[in-house]
Image (cartoon, rainbow, N blue to C red):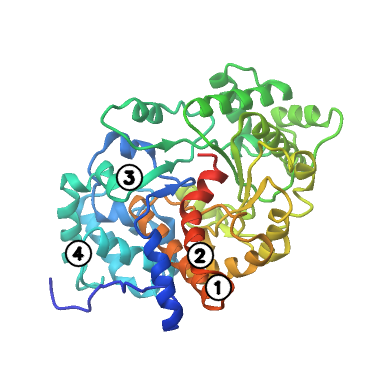
């Protein structure tokens, strides 16, 4: 490769700058650095592992499917179509150009977690030693492409290399889960890949596609969805199907966290209006809030951990959504309220021994005001790790500082990577382990915690918390 600035992630990156605290953090990090990864919430397609085909090229591995990467380049003036979004498989020439755009835009990622993840992936997985730039783009592309042609860089080999113990996917309630079943039955495969029940679009009766969605739900479940009671029963049937295929959680993402129940025959009336196409946006939200309460009731019966991550305006830029579809980087966070929104759910089920509820937010103002007090009282409630826009070093540090006084460490979820970018999984988990080690090291340095307790805690955050919270 040409003589260029090196790409060499520092071994002490993200650890405290104070030498005395850093020494403690190094020891704590050393206790968890090589532990297996438990990933209870993510978006990797299970067919990647089932088929075990080589990844196509660097661009379609690192750039095109990852809205964390594409959105900042788009903000810098690079059209999404130039990054391969929505274009299907790319030719080698097209892939090289996408990769060149990433390398030429390297400066826009300065200070971001995306830069941290990409540097870790390039250096630690693909042995890249020079900083990406327009000048080094082709050489780095060739080096990664050469690696991707080798058997040890196929998805299953990387799964083992990354020491992934559990990987959860995100799945539609109507999915037959055939890839999960095939993986579980494959005698050459020893990994654990679990489906996750994600019913969002089936709960939003004001959506234009809702009638068709619940009709499909009825067909797949074998339960007629022409009535409200049939809708509920069909959901219960599909949840059982997921549990039978190893699912441990149900995932919910709506504009708000409301769980207000409907009275009398209002649920039946609104459901009928939904089927007739006459339901208003406000009525649709009321029916969804009622059904989210029903989902909590179902979790007390089938044991699926309930994860709730509300407060995002999906597809904020209509023209982009119309052209490219969902999950391309134009989702924007909203202000959020949990205390009253979740009160109906928690009054009914908050002390139920079988219910686990994990609350995620993109609104930092609720960390200490709402999430920590809720998790500090209700035995069913856990605080989800910072995700999406908050999956960043300073935000994670603010989160720990905001919640620990009230909720400690035991009422948190353990790290979740929430990614479609398969090769970023170890980098994301490593970032979390370093930050937690640094936070705990500061407590030790201030004589607020003994070092043996800090070791026990950081190991628990990596292994104990996700296993308990997601009932693995």
User: How far is disc 3 from disc 2 in space, using C-alphas?
Assistant: 48 Å
* Above or below, 122 relative to 43: below
Q: Are marks 2 and 1 in contact (CB under 8 Å)?
A: yes
The residue positioned 34% from the left and 30% from the top of the image is 183
The residue at which mark 1 appears reads as 443
* Above or below, 362 relative to 421: below
On screen, residue 294 versus residue 423, left or right, reads right
Badge 1 crowding class, 10 Å Cα cut-off, few under 14, some 14 to 19, many 20 or more, is: some
The residue at which mark 4 appears reads as 140
User: How far is disc 2 from disc 4 in space, using C-alphas?
Assistant: 40 Å
Label disc, if present, on residue 415 of the rendered structure: none
Badge 4 crowding class, 10 Å Cα cut-off, few under 14, some 14 to 19, many 20 or more, is: many
Which-is-in-front pick, marks 3 and 4?
A: 4
Sequence-earlier tag: 3 or 4? 3
The residue at which mark 2 appears reads as 454
Q: Is residue 399 visible?
A: yes
Sequence-earlier tag: 4 or 1? 4
* Above or below, 214 relative to 39: above
């Amino acid at each position: 490769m040409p003589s260029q600035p090196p790409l060499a992630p520092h071994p002490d990156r993200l650890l405290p700058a104070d030498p005395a605290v850093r020494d403690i953090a190094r020891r704590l990090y050393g206790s968890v650095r090589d532990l297996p990864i438990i990933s209870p919430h993510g978006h990797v397609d299970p067919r990647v592992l089932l088929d075990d085909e080589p990844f196509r090229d660097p661009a379609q591995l690192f750039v095109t499917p990852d809205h964390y990467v594409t959105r900042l380049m788009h903000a810098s003036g690079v059209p999404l179509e130039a990054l391969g979004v929505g274009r299907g498989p790319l030719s080698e020439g097209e892939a090289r150009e996408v990769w060149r755009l990433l390398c030429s835009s390297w400066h826009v990622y300065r200070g971001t977690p995306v830069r941290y993840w990409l540097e870790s992936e390039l250096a630690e997985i693909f042995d890249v030693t020079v900083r990406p730039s327009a000048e080094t783009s082709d050489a780095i592309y060739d080096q990664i492409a050469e690696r991707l042609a080798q058997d040890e860089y196929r998805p299953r080999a990387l799964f083992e290399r990354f020491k992934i113990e559990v990987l959860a996917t995100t799945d539609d309630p109507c999915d037959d889960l055939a890839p999960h079943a095939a993986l579980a039955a494959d005698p050459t495969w020893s990994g654990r890949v679990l489906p996750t029940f994600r019913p969002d679009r089936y709960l939003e009766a004001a959506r234009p596609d809702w009638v068709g969605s619940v009709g499909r739900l009825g067909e797949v479940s074998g339960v007629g969805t022409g009535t409200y009671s049939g809708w509920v029963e069909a959901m219960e049937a599909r949840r059982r199907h997921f549990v039978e295929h190893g699912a441990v959680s149900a995932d919910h993402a709506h504009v708000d966290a409301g769980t207000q129940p409907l009275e009398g025959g209002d649920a039946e009336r609104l459901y009928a209006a939904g089927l007739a196409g006459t339901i208003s946006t406000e009525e649709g939200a009321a029916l969804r809030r009622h059904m989210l309460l029903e989902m909590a009731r179902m979790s007390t019966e089938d044991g699926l951990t309930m994860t709730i991550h509300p407060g995002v305006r999906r597809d904020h830029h209509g023209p982009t959504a119309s052209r490219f579809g969902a999950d391309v980087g134009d989702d924007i966070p909203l202000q959020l309220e949990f205390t009253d929104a979740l009160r109906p759910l928690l009054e009914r089920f908050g002390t139920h021994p079988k219910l686990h509820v994990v609350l995620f937010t993109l609104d930092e103002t609720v960390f200490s005001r709402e999430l920590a007090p809720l998790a500090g009282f209700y035995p069913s409630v856990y605080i989800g790790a910072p995700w999406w826009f908050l999956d960043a070093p300073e935000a994670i540090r603010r989160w720990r500082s905001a919640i620990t006084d009230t909720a400690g460490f035991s009422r948190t979820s353990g790290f979740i990577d929430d990614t479609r970018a398969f090769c970023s999984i170890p980098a994301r988990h490593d970032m979390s382990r370093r930050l937690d080690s640094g936070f705990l090291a500061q407590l030790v340095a201030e004589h607020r915690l003994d070092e043996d307790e800090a070791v026990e805690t950081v190991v628990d955050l990596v292994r104990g918390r996700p296993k308990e919270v997601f009932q693995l």
